[in-house]
Image (tube, rainbow, N blue to C red):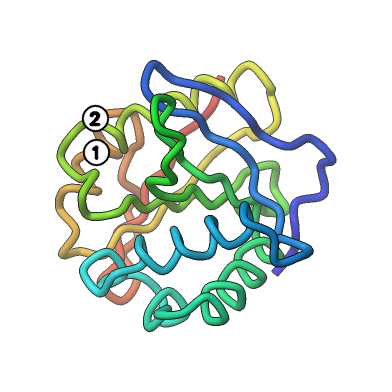
Amino acid sequence: MKRPTSPLSLAFNTPRLTMLTVAPPLVDDPPAQTLLNAIVKILTPTVTASLPPYFSNVHSSSQAKIWLDKMTSDSELLAITAQDSHTIMGFIFIHESDNGGANLGYLLGEEYWQQGFAKECLSGLLTYCQTLKRYRTFSAGVDKNNIASANLLTKIGFKPDNKNNAGVTFFSFHLS
């Protein structure tokens, strides 16, 4: 998989959230440990149930570091943080494709579900990326059992594609 080639890092705010590009920590300093602890806390079995296997079984800082290294080498990783507490609530993953588009993934810790955070951060991302003119399209795959995620993508303007691959429905969003 290819790492994003653009030197531009993403950073934007919504009314309640801040999204910042994450780079792998170089040393074991307190901010790095905070990030690794957040990864362990967020990647619960319920959160990772319909995600690829490398999202599962992250139960320690060393496993979180391996996951973080993989994610930052394969994609641009953004931390979703609460503006008021600076708590890491989840992550957005953007993997650039060769056609000017990008594959999009996201997850939130269970305690942040059904509060509008996913809609807020993804809507904010789409608005921000439209101003950057960095991507032409986003595509996202959703497990057929993840109805909430499919409904969310539809609400914010993604259109379902006609292809269904092994229980995954694909959605696309064309940036203007």
Task: Verify CB contact (< 8 Å) between mark 2 and mark 1.
Answer: yes
Q: Nearer the viewer, residue 165 or 15?
A: 15
| Position of 128 relative to 98 (above/below) | above
- Choose top left, top right, bottom left or bottom right for residue 65: bottom right
Q: Is residue 168 left or right of residue 92?
A: left
Residue under the point 65% across and 34% down: 135
Can the viewer see residue 122 in this picture?
no
**Residue 113's x, y, as percent?**
20, 45
Mark identifier at residue 60: none
Mark identifier at residue 152: 1
Residue under the point 69% across and 24% down: 133
In which quadrant is the N terminus drawn? bottom right
Quote the CA–CA distance across marks 2 and 1.
5 Å
**Residue 15's x, y, as percent?**
39, 16
Mark identifier at residue 155: 2
Q: Is residue 171 left or right of residue 139?
A: left
Which amino acid does the dot numbered 2 rest on?
A: Lys
Circle 1 Cα neighbour tier, 10 Å, few/some/many (<14 / 14–19 / ≥20): some
Residue under the point 70% across and 31% down: 134
SS at mark 1 in the image: helix
